[in-house]
Image: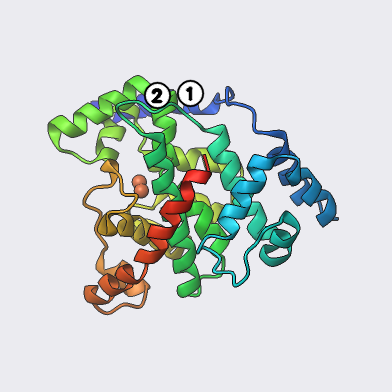
Amino acid sequence: MTAFQLTEQKKRERTELVLRNIYNLPPIPNAIKEALEMLDKPALNSHALSSIISRDQGLVTKILTIANSPLYGLQRKVTTIDFAILVLGYSELRNIISVLSIVEAFKNKTDQYLSQKEFWLHSYLTGSAAKRLAEDFDFPNSGEAFIGGFLHDFGFSIMHRFFHADFIEVYNIVNQKGVSYSEAELEVLGMSHQQIGHYLTDKWNFPETLCDAILYHHNPNDSKDSKSLATIIHLADYMTEKLNIGNCYWDKNLQLSDSEIGLLRFRETEQIEKLIENYKDLFVEQAETVRYLS
Ligand SMILES: [Fe+2]
Ligand SMILES: [Fe+2]
């Protein structure tokens, strides 16, 4: 083992120690907590669920905003939680509430290095595009694509909040040396934001395919078990940059490889460009709704 590998391993151990001890999160609002608990019960009572959610007017507004967004393409306007449960179903509702609980728990201060608004916009748009791609490409679980897309850069937000001095060092290294964020993150923390996101989602018992897709969202070809999901998230991420909507400074110069293009059954890049153009409306409209989320 070289001296460099040894220090990288030591840094990784130090980073994992901090990640293992992330407890000081703000409390999740009761309505979100109770709704998620109720959604986990085998004998689910939709009236009880609706009355729990309805106690929190802010939560009601957020759920209805997402339900009425182009993400679901519903014909009729959803104006009540009862109707939202009926048309979306429990599993979609669980995805929406999970995402809202994450935004709530990981709310952080904006500073000169990271705007929270931009971060959540990027997350929400990538999640939305990943969901739509999953549907368009017959991926079996579009809900997983939504959550995976939403959480793909979660490790970056964790770095900003729990490793702030290291975050600034990473930021400076990228700007001085012109290396990628993943490289600078490995140099400073011994872990990339992909690995941090994977570490936490795995610790929280998220489905393995989801954790794996988060780990490989920059290099889906290296994934053994979640190649399709990782590719879908990578393409959604790439779209934010190509459309210049909800894109971020840490995601510059994303590239799609030939095998990713092949996996999505495209023959040439031109077809991808057309597809991205077709997704533009979704991005514009979802960017409109995101301000209701945080
Ligand atoms: Fe990333
Ligand atoms: Fe990203």
Q: Position of residue 66 (x, y in %)?
A: 56, 55
114 above or below 286? above
Circles 1 and 2, Cβ within 8 Å, touching? The answer is: yes
Left/right placement of residue 37 relative to residue 286 reads right
Residue 18 — which label? 1
Please identify, in this view, whether the residue under mark 1 or under mark 2 is nearer the observer. Answer: 2
179 above or below 15? below
Q: Is residue 152 visible?
A: no
Amino acid found under the numbered disc labelled 2 = Phe
Amino acid found under the numbered disc labelled 1 = Val
| Residue name at image x 62 percent, y 65 percent | 77
Of the pair 286 and 25, the residue shown nearer to us: 286
* Residue that label 2 marks: 163
Identify the element where label 2 is drawn: loop
Query: Which residue is outermost to the top?
Result: 165
Which image quadrant for residue 223?
bottom left
Label 1 CB-ligand 1 distance < 8 A: no
Of the pair 9 and 189, the residue shown nearer to us: 189
